[in-house]
Image (cartoon, grey):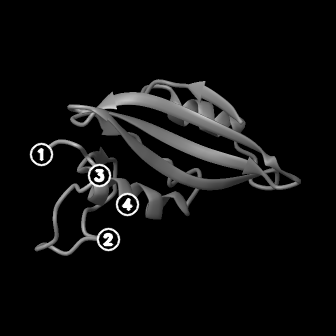
């Protein structure tokens, strides 16, 4: 696995330059709670012809940061983006809340903090 740190300002540009839909499979956009008001966001890809070859782009952010959308680059990313919104309570451009959690559910269950 190759893990590459990016900033929120450059992540779209980096992924656009990297991603070839016939070569790479977008696995998911993942979140990892680090500490109070901090998390790591991970954009994870695997190579079609070498499944053991995985590339993870990551950014450490505050829960108040807005994560750029990659849906125009990879349409299937909408599911992962909306999951981050529900599970961590973060903002992802163009991604609404309410895909996984009902209004009366525990909100932001993976955030490690209350927003």
Closest to the observer, 53 or 19:
53
- Label 2 CA crowd tier, 10 Å (few <14, some 14–19, many 20+): some
Which residue has dot 4 on it? 83
Residue at left offset 45%, top offset 29%: 59
Question: What is the distance, in whole Å, between disc 3 and disc 4 at their CAs?
Answer: 11 Å
Q: Nearer the viewer, mark 3 or mark 2?
A: 3
Q: Of helix, strand and loop, which one carries label 1?
A: loop
Earlier sequence position, callout 4 versus callout 2 = 4
> Horizontal and vertical percent for residue 42?
50, 40
Question: What is the distance, in whole Å, between disc 4 and disc 2 at their CAs?
Answer: 7 Å
55 to the left or right of 80: right
Q: Of helix, strand and loop, which one carries label 3?
A: loop
Image quadrant holding the C terminus, namely: top left
Q: Nearer the viewer, mark 1 or mark 2?
A: 1
Earlier sequence position, callout 4 versus callout 1 = 4
Question: What is the distance, in whole Å, between disc 1 and disc 2 at their CAs?
Answer: 19 Å
Question: What is the distance, in whole Å, between disc 4 and disc 1 at their CAs?
Answer: 17 Å
Residue at left offset 61%, top offset 37%: 56
Identify whether 39 is placed above or below 111: above
Marks 4 and 2 in Cβ contact (< 8 Å): yes
Question: What is the distance, in whole Å, between disc 3 and disc 1 at their CAs?
Answer: 10 Å
Q: Which mark is residue 99?
A: 2
- Label 4 CA crowd tier, 10 Å (few <14, some 14–19, many 20+): many
Quadrant for residue 15, please give it.
Answer: top right
Q: Of helix, strand and loop, which one carries label 2?
A: loop
> Horizontal and vertical percent for residue 22?
81, 55
């Amino acid at each position: 696995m190759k893990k590459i740190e990016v900033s929120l300002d450059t992540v779209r540009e980096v992924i656009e330059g990297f991603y070839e839909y016939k070569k790479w499979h977008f696995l998911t956009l993942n979140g990892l709670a680090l500490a109070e008001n901090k998390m790591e966001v991970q954009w994870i890809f695997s190579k079609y012809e070498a499944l053991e070859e995985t590339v993870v782009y990551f950014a450490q952010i505050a829960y108040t940061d807005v994560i750029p959308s990659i849906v125009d680059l990879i349409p299937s990313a909408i599911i992962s983006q909306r999951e981050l919104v529900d599970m961590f309570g973060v903002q992802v451009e163009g991604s609404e809340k309410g895909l996984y959690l009902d209004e009366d559910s525990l909100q932001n269950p993976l955030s490690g903090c209350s927003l």
